[in-house]
Image: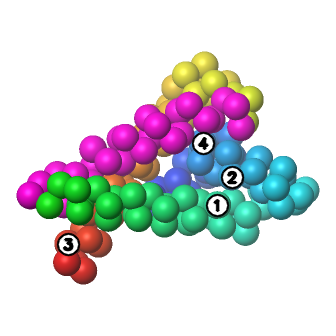
């Protein structure tokens, strides 16, 4: 997911990568950093959230053992996007994801990044199961 987001960051900057923008604001508020972008803070929160998402996915595979991992992974990434990103983006950053200064493309880029996350998560789980 992070690799895909680098492409969008290079195109639109920090505001164009929802997850990074949120993490920058969290770093400023919680870690009291003043550097923009503060990549250490951005990636700390990013990988922490991704790891927690992986734990949630592991629990999901335990709850639904008969459903294939790959069949769970991409819908799970959509669920994460709908439940954890869209509702919190505006309260954290002040920018509405659907009425964004850069248009709707950053929202679709974020969704695409989540799909990549889900697919890679599923592949990783298959590798270790």
Name which residue lies at 9% across and 58% down.
Answer: 66
Name which residue lies at 61% across and 35% down.
Answer: 88
Quote the CA–CA distance across marks 4 and 1. Answer: 13 Å
Question: Residue 46 placed where, x, y %?
Answer: 59, 60
- Precedes in sequence: disc 3 or disc 2: 2
Question: Residue 3 placed where, x, y %?
Answer: 48, 62
- Precedes in sequence: disc 4 or disc 2: 4
Marks 4 and 1: CB-CB under 8 Å?
no
Question: Residue 49 placed where, x, y %?
Answer: 54, 59
- Precedes in sequence: disc 3 or disc 4: 4
Magenta extent: 66-92
Q: Secondary structure at mark 1?
A: helix
Left or right: where 23 falls relative to 112: right
Crowd rating for badge 2 (residues with CA inside 10 Å; few <14, some 14–19, many 20+): many
Q: Which residue is mark 4?
A: 18
What secondary structure do most residues of the magenta stretch adopt?
helix
Q: Which residue is mark 1?
A: 45
Name which residue lies at 52% across and 26% down.
Answer: 104
Quote the CA–CA distance across marks 4 and 2. Answer: 9 Å
């Amino acid at each position: 997911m992070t690799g895909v987001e680098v492409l969008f960051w290079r195109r639109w900057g920090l505001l164009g990568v929802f997850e990074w923008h949120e993490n920058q604001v969290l770093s400023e508020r919680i870690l009291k950093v003043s550097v923009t972008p503060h990549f250490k803070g951005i990636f700390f929160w990013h990988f922490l959230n991704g790891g927690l998402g992986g734990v949630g996915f592991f629990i999901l595979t335990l709850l639904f053992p008969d459903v294939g991992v790959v069949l769970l992974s991409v819908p799970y990434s959509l669920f994460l996007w709908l439940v954890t990103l869209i509702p919190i983006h505006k309260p954290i950053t002040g920018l509405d994801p659907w009425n964004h200064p850069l248009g709707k493309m950053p929202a679709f880029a974020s969704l695409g990044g989540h799909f990549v996350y889900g697919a890679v998560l599923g592949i990783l789980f298959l590798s270790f199961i």
